[in-house]
Image: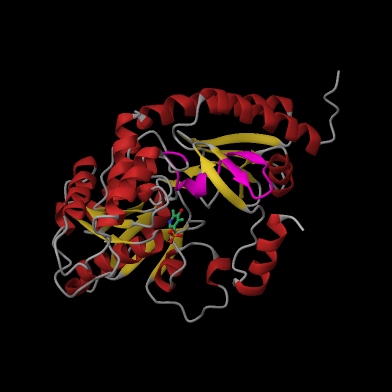
Amino acid sequence: MSKSQDVIDMFSEYVMPTYAPSLVLTKGKGTRIWDADGMVYLDFIAGISVLNVGHCHPRVVDAIKLQAGELMHVSNLFYTENQARLAAKLSTLSLGGKCFFGNSGAEANEGLIKLARLWGHEKEKFEIISMNNSFHGRTLATAAATGQEKIRKGFDPMPEGFYQIDYNDLDGVRAMITDNTAAVLLEAIQGEGGVIPADEAFMTGVRELCDEHDLLMLCDEVQCGMGRTGDWFGFQGYGVRPDAFSVAKSLGSGYPIGAVVSGPKLADVFQPGTHASTFGGTPLACAAALATIAVIEEENLITKATVTGATFRAGLEALIAKYEPVTEVRGKGLMLGLVLDQAAKPLTDIMQTQGLLALPTAENVVRFLPPLNVKESEIEEALEILDDSLAEWLGIDTEE
Ligand SMILES: *Cc1c(COP(=O)(O)O)cnc(C)c1O
């Protein structure tokens, strides 16, 4: 029996089947990942945008090792230097306010929602407007904010006060505002929704609507943040400042950490006793995050996301003319989607057997989220595998 089969058998016996995983992976380095049977893959999923600095970056590994031997956890009943330094860094890079730390994207968004509710409480503002096809997490409140029926199905009754409107429909948002609206929550680029960037006019229009009606603009940067789109945070590419945003996924390079990051307006809404998290901002999690940010700065990965992203995008766009089912390339920086006129899963399955991992999304989109330090040569290699996989998928004979 193969090593992989052992693991798969134990999963089917003991792990709740919330996912339908495929490969058994054992080792990662940079953009490459190895399975239990020794096959190597180019990883253009990167933990769904968790590994923006690649697998096992030595700088992050060393920071975790060092901190694990010093102090892992003390609870938030005590001050720790790493949490202070990380909060200062995130604030400086974004809105100039304060941070609250948790452990995941859902927990960060739950924190954003609670922050908005507490801010609006005296004015009876509690409704949250979010977008159709958005994704904000799997807790009850974040699932209620998520604009996808399938994520809420079977979990009724959902928390009240969540309403959705089509992404990029500014008039729709305007029409949905009531005296009870507290906030508009959106992703600058929808990830799970199919790699769809917000229109410029929509982002600036939402900001104006929020100012006009005394609402909070909240951004979910869990997937598109941390340099992915060629800015530290996706909203920065629009020249718009939300009142607060969430970040998680790539913040700790695989060590779980999430944060609510606010501007000055919301910096002191949470007070002792109003919100908390046991594992939020431990010295160990913050060491991983500080090292991740240092790598992004030292390796110039914000610029690289734009530059390498442009090369990759050009290569993807060339496939539109070559293969009829390829209709469009969407996204920004190194968050790119290849749009097909049919289901993407059969194609990504072939890509996987040829050594390239990418994520089928929103049925007909192949989503690419490579590490931001992916080499140009690895982009070329991925494009060749993709080209071969498309030919195999469509039954085109490429032998001359
Ligand atoms: C992944 C994701 C989340 C949820 O993050 P978890 O860490 O899985 O809870 C929330 N919002 C967006 C945009 C995401 O991509």
Give the mark count: 0
Instruction: Name the spot of residue 173 as percent of width and height, x first.
Output: 39, 56
Residue 192 shown in magenta: no
Q: On the picture, is 173 further left or further right than 16? A: left
Figure quadrant, ligand 1: bottom left
Q: Which residues are magenta?
A: 33-54
Q: Quadrant of residue 109?
A: bottom left
Image position of 63 with respect to 282: above or below:
above
Residue 48 shown in magenta: yes
**Is residue 245 at all visible to an observer of this figure?**
no
| Residue 267 or residue 378, whichever sits in front | 378
Q: Residue at x 47, y 58 (%)?
A: 135
Q: Residue at x 57, y 78 (%)?
A: 154
Hey, which residue is sitting farthest top in the picture? Answer: 400
Q: On the picture, is 286 further left or further right than 321? A: left
Instruction: Name the spot of residue 224 as percent of width and height, x first.
Output: 41, 45
Give the image's coloring scheme.
Answer: secondary structure
The quadrant of the rendering that contains the N terminus is bottom right
| Residue 183 or residue 311, whichever sits in front | 311
| Residue 74 or residue 349, whichever sits in front | 74
Image position of 229 with respect to 300: above or below:
below
The quadrant of the rendering that contains the C terminus is top right
Instruction: Name the spot of residue 131 as percent of width and height, x first.
Output: 45, 57
